[in-house]
Image: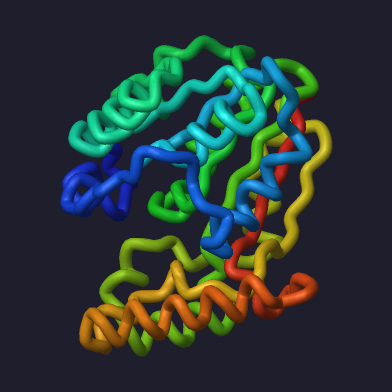
Amino acid sequence: MENESDLAGPKHWDSRALRVSRRSPSRLNVTVADLTDLLSAHLRPGTSVLEVGCAPGKFLLWCALERQAKVSGVEYAPKSAEATRELFRDMQVPIDLRTEDFLQTSFPPGSFDLVFSFGVIEHFDDPRPIVRKHVEVLRPGGRAIITVPNYGGFYGTIQSKLDRSNLLLHNLDIMNHQSLSALAPADLSGEVRTYAWGRLTPWILSFDKRLPPALARSFALGVNVLGLLQPVMISKMAPWLVLEISRR
């Protein structure tokens, strides 16, 4: 069921062309490298993991293949969910994938050691219910890792020049540490942290809206190389803000 506060909606996500390569995601993509590093410290063989808004499933596939985690996913856009299901079927990797609204998920409370979402909660006018649901399905001592694109910084300035309409699909008000931290449910949360994460990346910017496709791709690949060569993370250049919550 589509949530009325969702700024994007399942039709938006299903409009994407999901050409999914049948392999674990490449760490030559700077965003893949940074986000898998973010997850890695919380993964052990047998860790129960849920990704919210999981299409096309590549991060869950990495969790399963590289860290031997037990993976589950929620994806409410039907075509996106089916593309994810086909990826895992072709790779012969088990997954508990449910096509449903996460706010009304059939996964019971206290089910997972780790729940994560990358670029989901900022598509809601009021993200508090979906953040709360991340924490509710955690076991005591489990951890939620929630990222939003850092459009409150220079990435937002660039994106506003490239594709202002895309920014309208995002709740820009939560893209600062104070607002992000305030989303954590006080009655369920233990430790709450917010921090900037990641190296320079082109992959949250819509260069294709202003440049010819071949030039946009070449430019993005060049920026990706610069990100891979970046020796340390620099907060003002970080493409992600992270909300990390432990369950009491």
Q: Is residue 225 above or below residue 72?
A: below
- Which residue occupies 60% across, 13% down? 111
Q: Which of the 4 image quarters holds residue 200? A: bottom right
Q: Left of 111 or right of it: where is 75?
A: left
Whether residue 187 can be seen here: no
The C terminus, quarter of image: top right
Counting from the top left corner in percent of width and height, residue 78 is at 20, 32
Q: Which of the 4 image quarters holds residue 230? A: bottom right
- Which residue occupies 79% across, 72% down? 232
The N terminus, quarter of image: top left
Q: Nearer the viewer, residue 155 or 191?
A: 155
Counting from the top left corner in percent of width and height, residue 16 is at 21, 53
Outermost residue on the right side: it is 191
Q: Left of 183 or right of it: where is 44?
A: right
- Which residue occupies 76% across, 17% down? 140
Q: Nearer the viewer, residue 71 or 109?
A: 71
Whether residue 44 can be seen here: yes
Counting from the top left corner in percent of width and height, residue 215 is at 30, 87
Q: Left of 49 or right of it: where is 143?
A: right
Q: Total marks drawn?
A: 0
- Which residue occupies 36% across, 71% down? 167
Q: Nearer the viewer, residue 99 or 136?
A: 99
Q: Left of 155 or right of it: where is 199?
A: right
